[in-house]
Amino acid sequence: MFRRTSFVLAFLPLMLVGTASGATADTVTSHISYNRGTLTAAGLGCDPVYFICGVGTFDGQPATFAFYPPTDEGQFVGDCFEYSEVDEVVELQDGSGSLLLRHTVTICPPTPNWWKNQGLASFGNPWDLESVWTVVSGTGVYADAWGSGSWTAFWAGASGAGQHSGDIARG
């Protein structure tokens, strides 16, 4: 009897520490639409040719999404182009919270020959975008959030669609 009680008492502080933080992790997903019409209707004033903006859902809530220009010049990786620091702001439309996510984005054109014919200036053709992201900061319900995940999107001209997936913990 003494051994069993000692074992439980020895691990009780560890069990309490593990639950005392109150952190909860959510698997987040999003469904985003990028389209000039839906952007205008949502009151987003960004030009989707140079900035990627969208409306949709994030973590099950209606949200707006805005990606800002990369902070680096990028580099070719195979047939694709990669930017190592692209910031995205996700804002829940009810005003209950927002997140700043930092992405490493890989942009792939429809064909490898596209680069020599169009360069980095034309966005009329289809693009595949993939990234990994980490939470930089948050407000409201995401005030103490941390986590990471991935983002995929398909873009052609002034419209496209994308989706986040990952885990965000809140303290």
Image: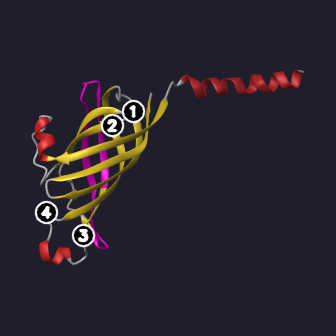
Residue under circle 2?
A: 58
The amino acid pointed to by label 1 is Ala
* Cα–Cα gap, marks 4 and 3: 11 Å
In the structure shown, which secondary structural element does the residue marked by tag 2 occupy? Answer: strand
* Magenta region includes residue 166: no
Residue under circle 1?
A: 145
Classify 52 as above or below 99.
Answer: below
Residue under circle 3?
A: 110
Residue under circle 4?
A: 124
* Cα–Cα gap, marks 1 and 4: 36 Å
Q: How many marks?
A: 4
Prevalent SS, magenta region = strand
The residue segment tinted magenta is 76-104
Q: Residue at point 23% right, 45% down?
A: 33
Q: Are marks 1 and 2 in contact (CB under 8 Å)?
A: no
* Cα–Cα gap, marks 1 and 2: 14 Å
